[in-house]
Image (cartoon, coloured by chain):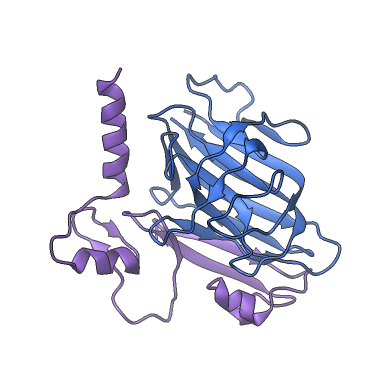
Chain colours: A purple, B blue
């Protein structure tokens, strides 16, 4: 996919990560231990800019904002379901800051 | 504008908790040079230089509290354009590894973090953003105006030596 980032974790010449640390940091312990390379696609949430490692085995639908026409993370996806949710993408925040800057000269 | 690379060499990334002040010369930080400056972070690389197994929970995170009086970076660290004849921009981005008071990496759930955990004994981690998927820094106020690459003890990291770089583009 053209919108995927790329994460590369190289422990070919390293003892790698202990299983508990790998799990705590959201990485696959089998691919971050000694002698292993972990390569993964990433997506960036359009609302909060969190970078998410894509789980290729996921069958649940991924979050998507139809207003942004872009991927959003699970946290933002849940927030978007809440009643009274007000849509605000990271680009909206950027735009509002830039507009304020222009008004203030 | 033009792409720049902020590089640090031989920093000891002291593990510290998310939500606590980072340790001087134990992190890399980028701050907007003006209230309306936009910075795209395009690549982050950390290559471990520890001489024994050292797990580092490196994270790029928003700063929930900004530093005060950043110290201008000095050799061997560097910050320069990828293109040698780069034009100077009006608002100069502030790259730093030390300050009078260090920044606080955010511990807020809704503040973005980029996980770059690795073993600093020979490990390398690199993240590249796809177009439109870049990490962004906007303005120069917390939390969106400054990002910190640091070693999170909250994520199980231990203190260790590493080189790192951040490729970014400022507007």
**Looking at the rendering, in which quadrant would you find the C terminus of chain B?**
top left
- In the rendered view, would you say A89 is above or below B80? below
Q: Nearer the viewer, residue A35 or A86?
A: A86
Q: Residue furthest left?
A: A84
B8 sits left or right of B65 in the view: right
Q: Residue at x 57, y 54 (%)?
A: B20
- In the rendered view, would you say A72 is above or below B70? below
A58 sits left or right of B124 in the view: left
* x then y, percent, for residue A76: 30, 63
Q: Quadrant of residue A7?
A: bottom right
Q: Nearer the viewer, residue B111 or B20?
A: B20
B9 sits left or right of B127 in the view: right
Question: Is residue B65 shown to the viewer in this render?
Answer: yes
Q: Quadrant of residue A61?
A: bottom left
Q: How many marks?
A: 0
* x then y, percent, for residue B63: 50, 47
Q: Residue at x 38, y 48 (%)?
A: B132
Q: Residue at x 81, y 60 (%)?
A: B50
Q: Residue at x 42, y 58 (%)?
A: A50
- In the rendered view, would you say A31 is above or below B10? below
Question: Is residue B81 shown to the viewer in this render?
Answer: no
* x then y, percent, for residue B116: 59, 61
* x then y, percent, for residue B135: 45, 48
């Amino acid at each position: 996919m053209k919108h995927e980032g790329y994460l590369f974790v190289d422990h070919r010449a390293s003892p790698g990560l202990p299983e508990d640390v790998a799990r705590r940091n959201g990485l696959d312990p089998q691919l971050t231990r000694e002698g292993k390379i972990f390569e993964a696609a990433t997506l960036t949430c359009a609302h909060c800019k969190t970078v998410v490692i894509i789980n290729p085995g996921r069958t649940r639908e991924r979050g998507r904002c139809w207003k942004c026409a872009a991927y959003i993370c699970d946290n933002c996806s849940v927030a978007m379901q809440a009643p009274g949710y007000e849509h605000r993408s990271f680009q909206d925040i950027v735009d509002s800051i830039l507009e304020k800057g222009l008004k203030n000269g | 504008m033009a792409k720049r690379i902020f590089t640090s060499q031989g920093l000891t990334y002291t593990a510290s908790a998310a939500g606590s002040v980072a340790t001087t010369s134990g992190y890399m930080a980028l701050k907007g040079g003006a209230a309306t400056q936009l910075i795209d972070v395009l690549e982050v690389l950390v290559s471990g230089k520890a001489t024994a197994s050292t797990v580092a929970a490196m994270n790029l995170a928003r700063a929930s509290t900004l530093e005060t009086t950043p110290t201008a970076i000095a050799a061997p660290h560097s910050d320069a354009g990828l293109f040698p004849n780069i034009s100077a921009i009006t608002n100069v981005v502030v790259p730093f590894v030390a300050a009078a008071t260090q920044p606080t990496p955010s511990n807020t759930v809704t503040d973005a973090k980029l996980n770059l955990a690795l073993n600093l004994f020979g490990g390398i981690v690199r993240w590249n953003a796809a177009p439109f998927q870049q990490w962004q820094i906007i303005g120069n106020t917390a939390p969106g105006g400054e990002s910190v690459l640091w070693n999170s003890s909250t994520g199980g990291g231990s203190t260790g030596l590493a080189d790192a770089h951040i490729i970014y583009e400022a507007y």
